[in-house]
Amino acid sequence: MADKMQFNTFDAFEDAADGAPNASDKVHVRVQQRNGRKCITTVAGLADDLDIKRICKAFKKNFSCNGAVQKDEESGEVIQLSGDQRTNVKSFLVDQEICHSEHVVLHGF
């Protein structure tokens, strides 16, 4: 009788990862030091179905800064903005409902 024990293969934590955002779902906002007091803000990890050029244009208009969209092998399309715009970018993405605040990660000093 002890030889015929059966165990359930039920995984109780199977759907626990569905609610939490993956590392690939996050939007990374970084600041890079150029020279002296100059710095660049980069926004990577936006969804592929979004119009990145249009978002970059809105950033440039709202923040009064220069910007460009660069192609990257690892991150896809990356938005580069002049100056430290990390908090502005996060508030814009949340206000315009492009992504949730828990999906935006701020990096930098």
Image: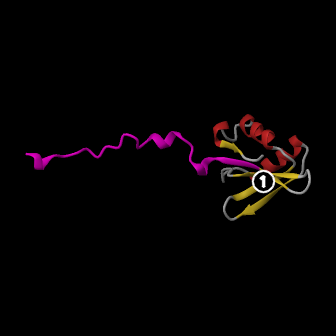
Q: Which residues are magenta?
A: 1-30
Q: Which residue is mark 1?
A: 79
The percent coordinates of residue 108 (x first, y second) are 76, 47
- Looking at this view, name the residue that lies furthest to the bottom: 73
Residue sitting nearer the eye, 61 or 108: 108
* Up/down of 73 relative to 46, above or below: below
The percent coordinates of residue 44 (x first, y second) are 71, 53
Which residue is located at x 64 percent, y 47 percent? 26
The percent coordinates of residue 16 (x first, y second) are 45, 40
Quarter of the figure with the N terminus: top left
Asked if the stretch drawn in magenta spans residue 13, the answer is yes
Asked if the stretch drawn in magenta spans residue 45, the answer is no
Residue sitting nearer the eye, 51 or 12: 12
Which residue is located at x 59 percent, y 49 percent? 23
Which residue is located at x 87 percent, y 40 percent? 62
Other-residue count near label 1 (Cα within 10 Å), few / some / many at <14 / 14–19 / ≥20: many
* Up/down of 96 relative to 50, above or below: above
Residue sitting nearer the eye, 37 or 43: 37
Q: Secondary structure at mark 1?
A: strand
